[in-house]
Amino acid sequence: MATTKLSTLVVAALASAALAWLLISNYYVRMPVFPWLPSVTLAALAVFEGYAAINTKARIDRQPGHDPVQPLLVARFVVLAKASALAGAIFAGFYAGLVLWLFIQQTRAATNDLPAASSGLVASIALVAAALWLERSCRVPERPEDADPSDDPAR
């Protein structure tokens, strides 16, 4: 399985930001107040994945006090990390579009919605970072016996 490409995340975020800008500019008058729950959920996911990254890396490296990791659990974490990175990028783009539009507007409603949208942007970026960290933590380190024998300078 290939690692998540940064370009994929950037394109998803940009497309989502453009969609958010179009939606918010056309339907903001009819929308309710932005809720805080998505921000809290994204932040909780980021904290969980950050903890999983630390724990998984320690278990893969077989550090003292950590049980060995089961390969199926690592595979599940990689799938979770790849999905979370993409979802976080989509949310980050959407919230970025909202924040930019709300920042430009000079109404009281836009000013009141700005903190919830900004916290969603920060939580989304944190989720992307934690997901990429978890994905990187799931890599198995290369062992000396796995190295290419043609690279051996003794030959």
Image (cartoon, rainbow, N blue to C red):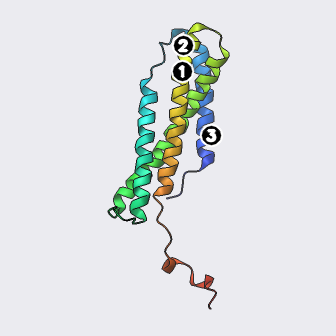
Indicate whether 86 appears above or below 32. below
Kindly indicate whether the residue at mark 2 contacts the one at mark 1 (C-beta within 8 angstroms): yes
| 153 lies left or right of 118 | right
Residue 112 numbered mark, or none: 2
Secondary structure at numbered mark 1: helix
- Residue 81 in picture, x, y percent from top left: 46, 48
Residue 115 numbered mark, or none: 1
The residue pinned by badge 3 equals 11
- Residue 108 in picture, x, y percent from top left: 58, 8
Q: Residue furthest front?
A: 64
Numbered disc in front, either 1 or 3: 1
Of callouts 1 and 3, the N-terminal one: 3
Q: Residue at x 40, y 64 (%)?
A: 63
At label 2, which amino acid type do we have?
Answer: Asn
The picture quadrant where one finds residue 114 is top right
| Real-space CA distance between mark 2 and mark 3, rounded to the nearest whole angstrom | 29 Å
